[in-house]
Image (tube, rainbow, N blue to C red):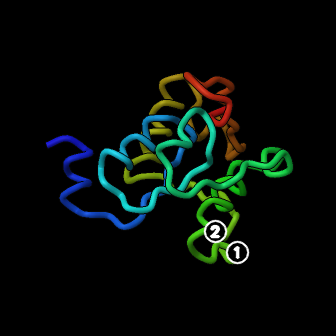
Amino acid sequence: MGIAARMRSEAFDLGIAQPNAFRPALLLRLGGAHQRLGYGRDGRSILLTDRAEATPELLEKHDVEYHLNLIGKVCDASQTPRDLVLEPGPGTPEAALRVLEQHGLSQEQRQGAPIIAICPGAAAGTAKR
């Protein structure tokens, strides 16, 4: 069963089209969501029943504020925490130590010094950088 068919079987009252791409809005439409909320950009306005405006001021803000603005159209998002929290998955610290040791950076050699990793690229989209 495809995504749209599974959505239709659930009979959603509301769907929020995120990210800003045509496909999420199309899936909400094909999936039968009665109310479809999203930013009316990128050729998807026709698929939405409710459109939020991406004002120039909003576009200057961080993506978190941009997406919370949309969520705020249907519920109170004002108290939503803005802190970025990254929780490592099970076994991640051990796997990271193994990689460091493979590259000659054992715990003894590092002497407890902090490690900073930078990943400057992204496959697509500036929001991923």
Q: Which tag is nearer the camera, tag 2 or tag 1?
A: 2
The CA span between labels 2 and 1 is 8 Å
Is the C terminus in the top left, top right, bottom left or bottom right quadrant? top right
The answer to the question of whether label 2 and label 1 lie on touching residues, with beta carbons closer than 8 A, is: yes
Tell me the residue that label 2 is attached to. Answer: 72
Is 33 left or right of 124, judged from the image as shown? left
* Amino acid of disc 1: Ser
Residue 62 position (above or below residue 73): above
Residue 40 position (above or below residue 68): above
Is 90 left or right of 87, judged from the image as shown? left
Residue 68 percent coordinates (x, y): 65, 61
The residue at 18%/58% (across/down) is 9
SS state under label 1: loop
The residue at 58%/75% (across/down) is 75
SS state under label 2: loop
Counting labels gives 2
* Amino acid of disc 2: Gly
Residue 70 percent coordinates (x, y): 62, 59
Residue 82 position (above or below residue 25): below
Q: Quadrant of residue 126?
A: top right
Tell me the residue that label 1 is attached to. Answer: 78
Residue 71 position (above or below residue 57): below
Characterize the local packing of mark 1: few (<14), some (14-19) or many (20 or more) Cα atoms within 10 angstroms: few
